[in-house]
Image (cartoon, rainbow, N blue to C red):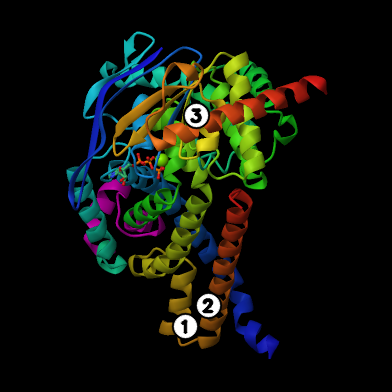
Amino acid sequence: MLTDFFGPTIELWPEILHALGQTGYMMMFAMGIAALAGIPLGTLLYLIRPGSLAQQPRLYAVLDTAVNILRSFPFLILLIVLIPITRFIVGTAIGTTAVIVPLAISAIPDFARLIEQTLLEVNRGVIQAAEAMGASTFQIVTKVLYREARSGIVSTCTIISINFLSFSTVAGLVGGGGIGDFAIRYGYYRYQLDVMAFTVALIVIIVQIIQSTGNYLVRRLDKRH
Amino acid sequence: MLELQNILKSFTGADGRHDVVNNVSLSVGKGDIYGIIGASGAGKSTLLRTINLLERPDSGEVWLEGVDLTKLGKRELRLARGQIGMIFQHFHLIENRTVYDNISFPLEIAGVPKKERRERILESLAIVDLQDKVLVYPAKLSGGQKQRIAIARALVARPKLLLCDEPTSALDPDTTGQILRFLQDINRKLHITIVIVSHEMEVVGSICSKVSLMERGVIAETLDLAERKQHEPKSQIAKLLFNHGQEAKEVDYAYGLLRAND
Ligand SMILES: Nc1ncnc2c1ncn2[C@@H]1O[C@H](COP(=O)(O)OP(=O)(O)OP(=O)(O)O)[C@@H](O)[C@H]1O
Ligand SMILES: [Mg+2]
């Protein structure tokens, strides 16, 4: 039974490892870019909200709508729509590196929204106390908001990276590779259901690991209780 | 040292405009412990918050040692706020910073070098007698301890003025007494002027030198508790406060003797 399960996959291990490497590569870079853009954008949304520290109600309305529109784009459509931009940035729209562009861009609005929500949970009183002490908006953001919201920010990163794992499956369509693409190629195109089952199990384990690590960090960082 | 002149502040709600603070003027002398007392919703907190412009008045002036704070630019106002400490009913400590790092915060803002910060933080902690809690997170402290840390955080910036918004309303009577004694000590030893907002008569009566009674956005009456014989209290609250003030002062005096003896 066990050998049945592992049997057909043993000779595929090098390929599986290669696919895992591609997934890791896509996730890491997409995550980095999405965080670099999403955290400042989410912070901006928080700050310019009506009634907030640097309120700009009109600009907020515009950005808010833009974020909602981008969030509602299905990933597959975004992948295609973004082809010209991807080609401009990477030089090609095909391959693992090329997939990073739509992957990162698709995550930015989600990231920003989740960061905004997380920051909204920070106690207003603490922020006012910092204002009363003479803190600038920048100091409040870096020394109070991010500090108080740090466990929420880690949760956000956990959610986004798990999303990446599932979105990167679609990357196979543009030659992106990765573990999800591997599962589809063997399971769907070659009818090797055992290989697919094994790969899906592998993905489940990876998701578990990411989630548990995230939960652990959240617990360690949260000193509110 | 602090003059509020014709402070007006209104909020517009669903049911129209409310003058929450309606043309209030008051004068706080150097070394005073100035109380503002009144019913819930009278506008006490709003008035207190106009002093450091957390709430910008619609009109009126806030003079602190010869400077009109309402005329300051953003940067200057931040510097001025550094000289005004503030403590709150719910403490408002940064939960993900240790006690040490909470007290460090105002100094970080002011750009004080690390070594000097350390000395001043430990000095402040000694004033509130909580040196053993340096590395603890606020969630592990009792309400009274949290307020003492908040006081230390306010003192570390060496303010001239300390604003207190219901500093003891979340605390039990014993802890209230303890916090009030800390405030009194700070006033006497460090010569920090204090403005304290409360709806508890005991609080105001026991430590204040002057008290204003606030009713629906206006100051109904101001009493000088230090020179109580000079004027007759008009309102019922004022009469109560007067008598209570006397008792509380006696209690406080007795407490002082006890302390001197041990
Ligand atoms: N930001 C605001 N927007 C609208 N209304 C406000 C705002 N702040 C205060 N108010 C209203 O102003 C009135 C006075 O509020 P304030 O907090 O100053 O009263 P208070 O005397 O401190 O009362 P309490 O003893 O309950 O703290 C209340 O009716 C309150 O609803
Ligand atoms: Mg109040």
Task: Find residue A32 and report its horizontal and vertical position in percent.
Answer: 44, 48
> At label 2, which amino acid type do we have?
Val
Residue under disc 1 on the same chain as residue under disc 3 = no
Residue hosting label 2: A200
Q: Quadrant of residue B170?
A: top right
> At label 1, which amino acid type do we have?
Gly
Could you say which disc has been placed on residue B242 in the image? 3
Task: Find residue B179 and report its horizontal and vertical position in percent.
Answer: 62, 33
Spatial CA span between label 1 and label 3: 87 Å
Residue shown at the point (60%, 71%) measured from the top left: A13
Spatial CA span between label 3 and label 2: 78 Å
Please provide the residue range marked out in magenta.
A79-107
Q: Is mark 3 within 8 Å of ligand 1?
A: no
Dot 1, crowdedness within 10 Å: few (<14), some or many (≥20)? some
* Secondary element type, mark 3: helix
- Contact between labelled residues 2 and 1, with CB atoms less than 8 Å apart: yes
Query: Does A195 lie within the magenta span?
Result: no
Host chain of mark 1 = A
Residue shown at the point (30%, 54%) measured from the top left: A92
Residue hosting label 1: A187
- In the picture provided, is A214 more to the left or to the right than A46? right
* Residue closest to the eye, A51 or B200: B200
Task: Find residue A130 and report its horizontal and vertical position in percent.
Answer: 45, 32
Query: Does A92 lie within the magenta span?
Result: yes
Q: Quadrant of the N terminus of chain A?
A: bottom right
